[in-house]
Image (tube, rainbow, N blue to C red):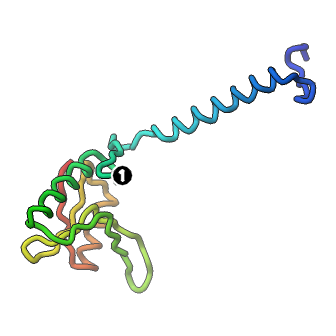
Amino acid sequence: MSRSARAIPLSCLGPDALRQIDNVLFAEREQGKLRAEKKANKFGAERTKVDGVWFDSKAEANRWSVLKLEERAGLITGLERQVPYDITINGEHIAKWIADFRYVRDGVAVCEDVKGVRTPVYRLKAKLVQAIHGIRITEIAA
């Protein structure tokens, strides 16, 4: 083993060396946090913040803004976001579907999902939600 490859106990290092090691470790931790925050969505959606609320995509955030305006104008009422629906069959919980938005328009309840990609799992959940809860999902293209 060469001299440079030998392990040196930290107790043998001076304060400047320990500070440098601490700075390197801190920088590596911070870079890891940044990488985790910037992790790309597999469908290319970009998390977006509107009115202090985070949305999974720009399209969903834009739709929220439109619905908020419609609510202020009195076109819709009872606007909610991220409304969960359990998918339970024969007493067994199978899955959960979360509606992006739910509101009432002209006396009719509407459940919306902003969709960029209609995955097979989403299509199956949409059919199950319709069969179990009687809800037809209104899809808004991203």
Tell me the kind of residue under disc 1. Trp
Relative side of 134 to 23, left or right: left
Q: Residue at x 86, y 14 (%)?
A: 4
Q: Residue at x 48, y 41 (%)?
A: 37
Relative side of 99 to 92, left or right: left
Q: Residue at x 89, y 25 (%)?
A: 7
Q: Residue at x 74, y 30 (%)?
A: 22
Give the number of callouts.
1
Nearer to us in this view, 79 or 101: 79
Relative side of 63 to 15, left or right: left
Q: Where 139 sits versus 91, above or below?
A: above
Quarter of the N terminus within the rendering: top right
Task: Point out residue 33 in the picture as x, y percentages from the top left corner.
Answer: 56, 39
Task: Point out residue 18 in the picture as x, y percentages from the top left corner.
Answer: 80, 26
Tell me the quarter of the picture where residue 14 sits.
top right
Crowd class of label 1 (few under 14; some 14 to 19; many from 20; radius 10 Å): few
Nearer to us in this view, 3 or 119: 3
Q: Residue furthest bottom?
A: 91
Q: Where 36 sits versus 94, above or below?
A: above
Nearer to us in this view, 26 or 101: 26
Relative side of 16 to 96, left or right: right
Task: Point out residue 138 in the picture as x, y percentages from the top left corner.
Answer: 17, 63
Reading the image, the residue beneath label 1 is: 54
Of helix, strand and loop, which one carries label 1?
Answer: strand
Task: Point out residue 49 in the picture as x, y percentages from the top left corner.
Answer: 33, 47
Tell me the quarter of the picture where residue 105 sits.
bottom left
